[in-house]
Amino acid sequence: MKASETSIRNLLEGTKQFQVPLFQRPYSWNKDYWDALWNDLMSIYEGEIEGFYFLGPIVTQAVSGTADGISPFLIIDGQQRLTTLSILLATLRDKLRQDNNSLAEELHESYLINKFKTNEDFFKILLTQTDRESYRYIINNKQQDNKSNGKINDAYQHFTKKLERQSRSFCEKLKSIILEKLIIVNITSDENDNPYLIFESLNNKGQELTQADLVRNYIFMKLPIDNREEQYNKLWLPLENTFKTQVGDKYSEELTNAFWFYLRKDGKSVQQKNVYQSLKKRFDDPQNNLTKELQLIVRFSKYYQRFNFPEQEESNSKFRKYFNNLLRLDFKTSHIFLLNIYNDYENEKISEQDFEKILIYLESYFVRRLFSGVSTQILGGIINNLYLEIQKTKFSSIVDGLYKTLNNFDNKKRWPTDEEFKKNLLTQTIYKGAKNDRTKFLLERLEQDQGQETVDLSTLTIEHIMPQTLNDEWKQQLGANYSSNHSKCIHTLGNLTLTADNARLYNNSYSRKLELLKRSNLYLNHYFREIEHWNFETIEDRANKLADIAIKVWPRQQC
């Protein structure tokens, strides 16, 4: 490797092109970084910093070119700085063009483009596919549509605002500062060096990158050069773009999570922080075909998307309902097992009907354990190994194997019986602070099972019929033991319902609440129409009726 100190002018002059390889993350600088760079430039402009200003290193690798073409270099490290400076030079060019300043064309032709080249060779910097279109618009000074907006365009708009009230002389001086005063150390590696290993070392084994970033980087450095672009466009980029649509800037973290679930689907225990290292071992295994491994990762990541973003990604309405249920219950651990089930379904090893039965059993298993007070802490280990356990048995089908496996679990792994489930629904506190959406889900499912009318349940909230804070009227109505009985019953199933009138009901007397509840179209509130007095006996009676429905909604018998 060779290192030399150089100015931005010397770095960019000549028929060169700096290419951002596929293993690099997209442009990610934000306002904090842009402002830090601008403030440094202003310090030089105001004379607070004298002489040259060291901007940091840029690591590149020379790539074979042609005699009549450009001199290409891969940017191994420093693409964020170099891209930002290029965008800033483009904003300076556009500002100077407003005054028909010849410096504008000098900036454009000497430091932004290779004037006599065409197609991709035309640009001094060639970004990855994610950013390429937005960058082209800026360099070609064309209006961007909304689809092209992103960090690249944000940076351009940011610096455009910085320059909009500045004079011609300010812009001319700033141009000289950027090209002459900013100094970098250009470290150029030999063409035979492994650019990814250099990149990985410079990024301290991934501490500054997400696990998904490192996975992408390693895959596309391992793939043959003539196959990288095709596989990136065909497999990786569409997957990455879908995650961006779903979670925005957090897409890389979500992709990491998808890989983590993929690694555990076969019963292996893998920590999330070791996702990259675990996948790297697979890629390095000579028995594995790298392209096929990439196809597998992408396929299972798409299943992950269907579980986590069912409204956008799952077309089957039955599956979509159950996937939403599992999300409401925060039972994402089930996705580890379901990755294999969805793959079996896609490969026509199980039918749609059997898949639905599997989802019914899983939801029942979780709900019965949750509302029976059985610890959920060991669920990770249970679900991790569940598919393997079923595979080892001699059941006629996966769905039968799942049912009998769950049915045979005992002690801490048990699937609560009807008796245990009902007993706990009668007595357990199910209204629990941060987990109250699970309680609302339970009430919604009871309503959906029995209700005859379509109601928008999302607008409803949980109401305590006997209020959480008792006034004198309630104390008198509940009798001498109101305090101890209130503590036992207040958050149990029998005392909870759904309503859109929570604010109006509040701590009112039962007679006042009854006036409002009688108007409700919900099945859950039909019970109150015949109940003139609300006390501990009626709470228990209603809980019994609702618990019987819950046993049917979350069955334990074989479908």
Image (cartoon, rainbow, N blue to C red):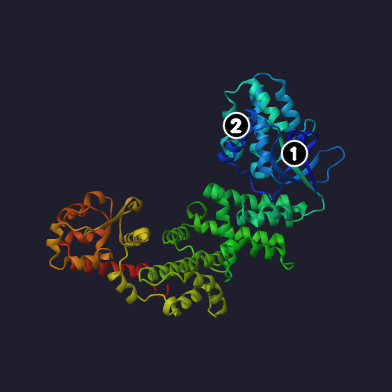
Residue 501 visible here: no
In contact (CB < 8 Å): disc 2 and disc 1: no
The residue to which callout 1 is attached is 120
Q: Residues within 10 Å of mark 2 (few under 14, many from 20)?
A: many
Q: Nearer the viewer, residue 552 or 81?
A: 81
Identity of the amino acid at label 2? Phe
**Where's the C terminus, which quadrant?**
bottom left
The residue at the point 47 percent across, 52 percent down is 311
> Is 116 displayed left or right of 299 in the figure?
right
Q: Tag 1, which secondary structure? A: helix
Q: Residues within 10 Å of mark 1 (few under 14, many from 20)?
A: few
Q: Which mark is residue 207?
A: none
> Is 270 displayed left or right of 543 in the figure?
right
The residue at the point 26 percent across, 54 percent down is 521
The answer to which of marks 2 and 1 sits earlier in the sequence is 1
> Is 535 displayed left or right of 315 in the figure?
left
The residue to which callout 2 is attached is 159
Q: Is residue 142 above or below residue 80?
A: above
Examine the image and state in which quarter residue 43 appears.
top right
| Rendered location of residue 302, percent (x, y) | 57, 57
| Rendered location of residue 5, percent (x, y) | 77, 40
Q: Tag 2, which secondary structure? A: helix
> Is 11 displayed left or right of 130 in the figure?
right
Examine the image and state in which quarter residue 450 appears.
bottom left
What distance separates the C-alpha of mark 2 from that of mark 1? 25 Å
Q: Is residue 515 above or below residue 287?
A: above
Residue 101 visible here: yes
Q: Nearer the viewer, residue 197 or 215?
A: 197
Q: Is residue 555 above or below residue 117?
A: below
